[in-house]
Amino acid sequence: MNQGVLELAGHEQANTLLLEIIDAVSEGPDLEPLAARVASLIVSATATDVCFVHVLDDSGQSLTLTGATPPFDQEVGKVQLALGAGVTGWVANNRRPAVIVDDKVSDPRYRYIPALRGTDYTSMASVPMASEPAGLVGVLNVHTKARREFTFRDLRLLTTIGSLVAGTMHMARLHRRLAARERASVRFADQVIAAQETERRRLAGDIHDGISQRLVSLAYHLDAANQSVQSEPAFAAEQLTLARELTDRALDEARAAIGGLRPPVLDDLGLAGGLASLVRSLADIDMTLDLAEQRLPEHAEIALYRIAQEALQNIVKHAGATEGRLAFTCSSHWARLEVSDNGRGFDISAYRPHCSSTNYGLTSMTERAQLLNGELRITSRLGEGTTVTAIIPLPDDEP
């Protein structure tokens, strides 16, 4: 077929393709099957050789290959691109189509991805998949082995397809998030029951081995002091000193047990004061604070406090950071907590939500945010630090 094939030889073929796209997007909410079928339809109708469908991930920071024509369908889910990286990332950042007719490697936007064998193909067209109110959902790419000029009509057709698919993919992502939130709720309920039993056993052990034993010893020393206060005043004074020490230890253990159940600092100082107290406990890290003096519902304050606590513990244990920042801000509808550091960072693509064996702390933070109908965003690069952001909605009656 000649250069004009992508223009589909008239409105009838264009309408046929668009009807097939509409049929594809009507089949269901699963992203991968939808992306695979759309890629296949586009290649068949436009006489291009391969098609890639890259979808913006939930963090809004990278694109994941979600659909592709053979043989690249084996790479689905494995290829990720940061926003701004390569032609695909450029199109996502600028919301504008891009065309490379030949000599890709001389184009400053081009980035070679071995898994996708870009140098096997001469020409490419890349368009954003976007619609209202979905916004940017991803990027649609087509490639040809033979040199090909992509016309304005070609790009308009691909952009129209991208817009049709974007709305459905946006709904699919919302459906996936809702399903994940429901799964998180079920897991959290199971974890709460298990944690309650574990906590009961831990508290019983702490009380038995710690507080109870100290109170028994305290009673012994008080009895000894009482019996010898007249005959051996020095011995009685020694027993009272020991009793005072045991009393202090028992009080410390009682406070620790109470703090494990609910942070008392929230009652005394509020969330801002509680967050500040967490930062004061850090050593060798210069933390900047930006804290709004606003009270939230009790359950929201506890959740954000625990998220901050976990994030700060991760900085101390893993980041190797010298500086960090903790910010708590509120708008009329949202509360936002952000904890960042200048530490060693990590490969965010290796993070798998809800994999408790390797990511227990991150999963715990994610589930706490989701249970408040919010979200947790984690951005990190090796050598460039990490930022954890929790955003939760506030009730309508909140100021």
Image (spheres, helix red, strand yellow):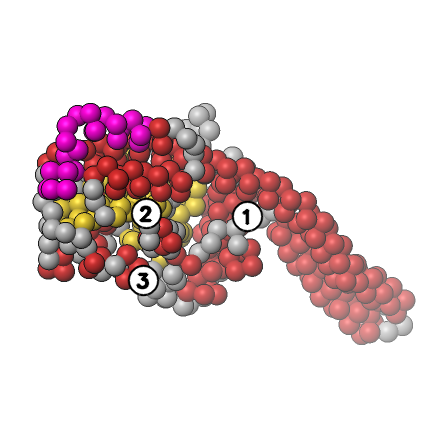
* Residue 216, image quadrant: bottom right
Residue 195 in the image: state x and y as whole percent.
66, 49
Vertical side of 212 occupied by 297: above or below: above
> Would you say residue 18 sits in the magenta stretch?
yes
The quadrant the C terminus occupies is top left
Amino acid at dot 2: Ala
* Residue 280 or residue 309, whichever sits in front: 309
Alpha carbon distance from label 1 to label 3: 33 Å
Residue 256 in the image: state x and y as whole percent.
64, 56
Q: Which residues are magenta?
A: 1-22
Alpha carbon distance from label 2 to label 3: 32 Å
Q: Residue at x 37, y 66 (%)?
A: 344
> Of circles 1 and 2, which is in front?
2
Question: Residue 10, which numbered label?
Answer: none
> Would you say residue 51 sits in the magenta stretch?
no
For the residue labelled by badge 3, is the local secondary structure a helix, a strand or a loop? loop
Alpha carbon distance from label 1 to label 2: 53 Å
| Residue that label 3 marks | 384
> Of circles 2 and 3, which is in front?
2
Q: Residue at x 49, y 59 (%)?
A: 313
Amino acid at dot 1: Val
* Residue 269 or residue 86, whichever sits in front: 86
Give whichever of discs 2 and 3 has the lower sequence position: 2
For the residue labelled by badge 1, is the local secondary structure a helix, a strand or a loop? helix
* Residue 267 or residue 351, whichever sits in front: 351
* Residue 292, image quadrant: top left
| Residue that label 1 marks | 265
> Of circles 1 and 3, which is in front?
3
In contact (CB < 8 Å): disc 1 and disc 2: no
